[in-house]
Amino acid sequence: MGIDKESDIAANLQIGPTTLGMVRLYIEAEGVELPLDFDPEEAEEIAEELLAAAAAARAMTEAPKSNPRK
């Protein structure tokens, strides 16, 4: 499965700090529990990538703004 393929898989995502000073992404789906720990700098990089991907996705779905002639 590629990043641009649709999927019927449902999952829960939880994000929070650990007691060891890491940032945990905890993904849970049917039969899968996946804790992913990142140091704070890595977590900030992931956050930046998420924001960039959200902006790109938004740009793809927004209607182009019309430019009426005067």
Image (tube, helix red, strand yellow):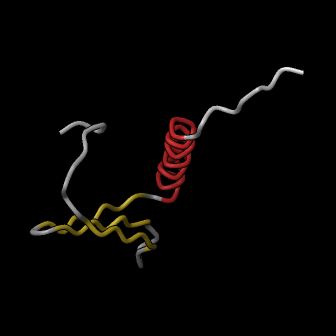
**Residue drawn at (63%, 32%) of the image:** 64
Count the labels in the image. 0
Q: Position of residue 58 (x, y in %)?
A: 55, 43
In this picture, is 35 found above or below 4? below
Q: Residue at x 37, y 71 (%)?
A: 14
Q: Position of residue 49 (x, y in %)?
A: 50, 44
Question: Outermost residue, top direction?
Answer: 69
Q: Where does the image place residue 5, in percent across and percent down from the top left?
A: 25, 39
Q: Residue at x 69, y 33 (%)?
A: 65
In-image side of 58 versus 36 (left or right): right
Horizontally, residue 67 falls left or right of residue 17, namely: right
* Res 55 quadrant in image: top right
State the residue in front, 56 or 23.
56
Q: Specify the farthest residue to the left.
A: 31
Q: Quadrant of the N terminus?
A: top left
Q: Nearer the viewer, residue 37 or 56?
A: 56
In the picture as drawn, the residue positioned furthest to the bottom comes out as 19
In this rendered view, identify the residue nearer to me: 11 or 45: 11
* Quarter of the image with the C terminus in it: top right
Against 27, residue 62 (above or below) is above
